[in-house]
Amino acid sequence: MNSQNTSKDNSKDTLKTLLKNTIDSIRADQPNPELVRESEARLWAQPSSSATAGAIHGCADVRALLEDYKNKKLAVPRALLVEAHLHECVSCSRYFEHAAAPLAWEPAKPSAATNPLPWKMYAVAAMIVIAVGAAALFMQSDRIFSPPGPRATVESIDGGLYRVSANGEQAVRPGDQFAEDETLRTPNGGHAFVRLSDGSHVEMNERAEFSVSQGRKNTTVHLERGDILIQAAHRTSGHLYVLSKDCRVAVTGTIFAVSSGIRDSRVMVIEGAVKVSYSGEEQTLHPGDGLSTASGAEAVSVKKEIAWSRNLDQYLQLLAQFASLEKKLANIPMPGLRYSSRLLRFVPQDTMLYASSPNYGDALKQADQLLHDQLQSSDALNKWWEQVNANRHPSLEEMIQKFQTLSQYLGDEAIFSVVQQGERCQPLILAEVQRAGLREYLESEAAKANNNLGGRTVLQVLDASELDGVVANGPGTKLFAVVLPQYVLVSPDPGLLKSTIARIESGSESGFAETPYGQLLTNLYSNGIGLLFTADIASLHQHRAMYQKGPRNQEDLSLSGFGDLKYLIAESKDVNSTSENHAVLIFNGPRHGVASWLAAPAPIGALEFVSPQASAVASFVVKKPEAMFDDLLSFGQASNPRAQSELEELESKLKFSLRDDFASTLGGEATLALDGPVLPTPSWKFIIEVNDSGRLQNTLHTLVEDHNDEASQHNYPKLAYDETQFEGRTYYHVHALSADSFADFYYTFADGYMIAGPSRAILVQAIATRNSSDSLARSSQFLALLPQNSQANVSALYYQNLAPLLDSVAGLTPSQLQSLRELAADSKPSMAVAYGEESQIEFVTNGKFPGLDPNTLALTRLLDLAGKGTK
């Protein structure tokens, strides 16, 4: 008996080995179909009492055999195939676990009453909250979700522009708009500038003709004939396409020209990069490149076809002036910190919002002088200043002068507060007076303002004794101002002014400083404040619940966890010539719901996959993704009693559990980085921690298969799913089988993380960076930007260093490149971090918040014009 068992075990081992080798061989190479049939016949010639003979082609065949497999009636080879499939296929495994009895399988039939779109949208929405990128697997037809409204607006015309339709031709004027697929045409000698609804600008040469269509993400220019030059707007998603008779051009944020003639179409690139598809091929063009779709055509000369954009030169000059001015402004001394307030004691007790500003009068005066000195030396800056002030009443120049003059009458602090007055919340401005003549100045300005608005009173300057009459007669103006010997008060509520003035004149305090909110402000003053904004969120919630309708919103707010938000604090101050900014959300107790998703500070290992040359990085750590999923489900059940059943229906269609097969496979940290050149494809990386890479891989594979099943039934673009081996690691490639879709990315798993990017080379480089220990997380420049406090880790961070992007910008003239380098030199690396504590969330940055630095804004815009190409 033992020998028989041993023989049987050896037989099983031999069959398993044979089966594995056979599967590997089939995966590596597809044999001749005739050989397949012969092998199949030999393999399955063994008798079986109940199992149906035949090849196993997929899930349907496996499920038909599950009952016999369960009852051990299958032949050994067939049972091993079923067992192997159950180990690899999440959907069949779950089907086998939950099936109480054998079910007759039949192909899925779409229900006439079922629309596949909603459940896919719900699936994508749930998965986006947990991990970026899964939504790409559910791409739908772009035109289905096209937004309403016009597609193009005429900006200027020289020589004529016509609207062409079946009803004939109609001359148009600047400001006229064109709807979906309406045709624009310039006559002989005509020239026009048109702005598309996505912000792109199209310049039309004579005898040019095109129409515009727009989808949910993409905008398409259908060029029928002639020459156009396009400055494409930067897009956060989607692309701008140009379709001619024989080619398609795809761009995001660049400057290029397209010509459609009798013999061929021609594409010329001025800035950025474009992808041109024609004759079954695709070619990427860079600045200075030109292409003709005609075979054997001479090389296209961009210089001959079009001239370099003069607007770009002017823009570069202007940005360089901004950079120079910003550097000078940074040297202006700001007002000193304030460690106490003489105004706080008079603020009404029911104040719910409190903001404090120093007197920026002296700093503004110096800044204004620097601006005018710069205007004298720069024609570009002076032209911009004239445009800013044109048709503005009052002009920006006048507003600066008014603010300067007003600041001379005021003390070192001004307070803006919002006070609860019964059902209404009224603003109150309070400041000290340091110089006589303020009332006369305010009366003069009030007369001008009231006269400019056709006699309608917007500001009235009163004595304190005149407030009784205003209260008795009812307010007839928007704002009242009262100037006392030491203080000035402004509010639209005469009663609020009267009660505050009474306290000031009697020397009595309001009691606000003794409230919890007032004590919080006192503590902030003790540490020194600059520009401060605070809000008593809890009191605002109470006021809303008491006087405003919307219990559903209150309940939603409570479930989200933000209903427990107590205070908001945001401040900016200069310490030792360094700008310090921080904001704090303080909760009544431990954070819960969505408010608790940001985890406590912790190491972020995903940063090890990012190089020190990265241009932009966003990282965060969150609590368990499955707990986040539970929060979302609870939130949905509160507003929709059928949320659970709809989830179950959704998961039956997805063939996997969103919580168990997706959310639970993920860890708590993720990083998105732009790490490398932006041309021809931005070198992005997405790194997310994983707890079960095998299960996640099965889920993603099932997701692609499910998408393709739906695509077959509803004529959607399918996705290809490829696997390759490189240096002992498996790389997966997901891409759309459609020229109109840009779903295309690679991913792999390494050291407990999933790394995704636009190419396999990006992933290989990311893994090499981690193994080399030369990563961003170990960079001295990066570490120096972290706030100097007691925290060893962070909960989230955003880092940017735009200078490395210079290496990927091509095609600029020497003067333009010099301007770009000057801008990059003034845009220093910056970082903002967040700390998730038990009952508060704090945001901190040294220097300007990333993205709000004028140099950063200018450089980012320039890179949009000069460097960002497709995808």
Image (cartoon, grey):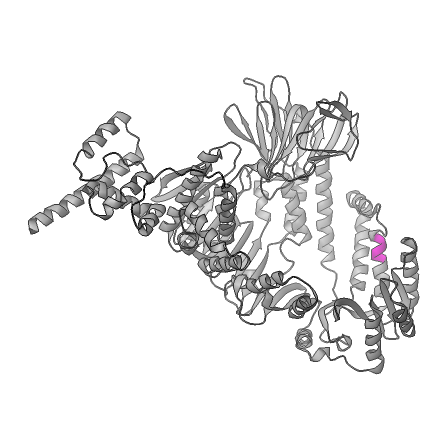
How many discs mark residues in the rendered view?
0
Whether residue 185 is in magenta: the answer is no
Determine which quarter of the picture holds residue 222.
top right
Determine which quarter of the picture holds residue 850.
bottom right
Q: Position of residue 435 (x, y in %)?
A: 88, 71
Between 414 and 4, the residue placed more toward the observer is 4
> For the point 62% across and 61% down, which residue is it?
553
Between 811 and 18, the residue placed more toward the observer is 18
- Tell me: 334 left or right of 559: right
Q: Position of residue 293 (x, y in %)?
A: 57, 22
- Tell me: 141 left or right of 513: left
Between 535 and 525, the residue placed more toward the observer is 535
> For the point 73% across and 72% down, which residue is it?
351
Q: Position of residue 10 (x, y in %)?
A: 14, 46
Residue closest to the far front: 113
Q: Position of residue 295 (x, y in %)?
A: 54, 18
Between 253 and 25, the residue placed more toward the observer is 25
Compared to 290, does 317 lie above or below? below
Q: Quadrant of the C terminus?
A: top right
Q: Is residue 764 visible?
A: no
The segment highlighted magenta reads 397-401
Compared to 409, does 136 lie above or below? above
Compared to 214, does 224 lie above or below? above
Q: Magenta region's main secondary structure? A: helix
